[in-house]
Image (cartoon, rainbow, N blue to C red):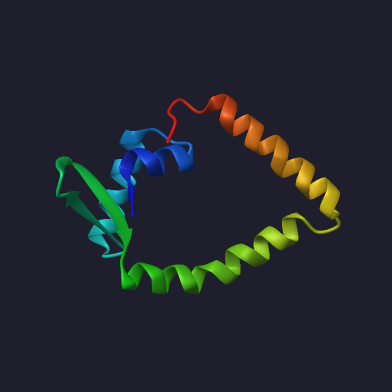
């Protein structure tokens, strides 16, 4: 599980946007938010069994799209791209996890 703040850092989005997105996912039964026993202000977000099933249905489509995007890009170019992307994400990160 992750907190809303942690998820927003990973998704490179505002906490308020992540919270609204999670509201919708929770209404659909795809995630669950549970208060932490040691700090009731913090909610741990976990994927539900239904959410996992939806992810497993969608993942092959996402993976095929990613493979198509990187078609004809060799391993060295791919590694350079990912390295550069990680640097960009570190540069724009507002909060450490």
Q: Nearer the viewer, residue 16 or 97?
A: 97
**Does 47 sit left or right of 70 as displayed?**
left
In which quadrant is the C terminus drawn?
A: top left
Q: Residue at x 78, y 49 (%)?
A: 78
**Total numbered badges shown on the rendered structure:** 0
- At horizontal 35% and vertical 42% (from top left) the residue drawn is 18
Location of residue 48 in the rendering, given as x and y in whole percent from the top left corner: 31, 67
In percent of the image, x 51 and y 68: which residue is there?
A: 58
Q: Is residue 77 visible?
A: yes
Looking at the picture, how far across and down is residue 39, in whole percent? 16, 41
Q: Nearer the viewer, residue 15 or 79?
A: 79
- Would you place residue 62 above or below residue 17 in this image? below
The quarter holding residue 4 reads top left
Q: Residue furthest front?
A: 38
41 to the left or right of 93? left
Can the viewer see residue 73?
Answer: no
Residue that appears at 19% across and 54% down: 34
Q: Position of residue 81 (x, y in %)?
A: 75, 42
Q: Is residue 33 left or right of residue 15?
A: left
Quadrant housing the N terminus: bottom left
Answer above or below: position of 54 versus 84.
below
Expressed as whole percent of the image width and height from the top left, the position of residue 12 reads 48, 37
């Amino acid at each position: 599980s992750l907190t809303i703040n942690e998820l927003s850092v990973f998704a490179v989005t505002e906490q308020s946007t992540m919270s609204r997105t999670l509201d919708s996912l929770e209404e659909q039964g795809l995630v669950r938010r549970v208060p932490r026993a040691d700090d009731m202000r913090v909610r741990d977000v976990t994927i539900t069994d239904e959410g996992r099933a939806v992810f497993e249905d969608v993942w092959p489509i996402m993976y095929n799209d990613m493979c198509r995007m990187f078609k004809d890009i060799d391993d060295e170019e791919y590694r350079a791209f990912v390295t550069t992307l990680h640097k960009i994400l570190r540069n724009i990160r507002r909060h450490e996890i």
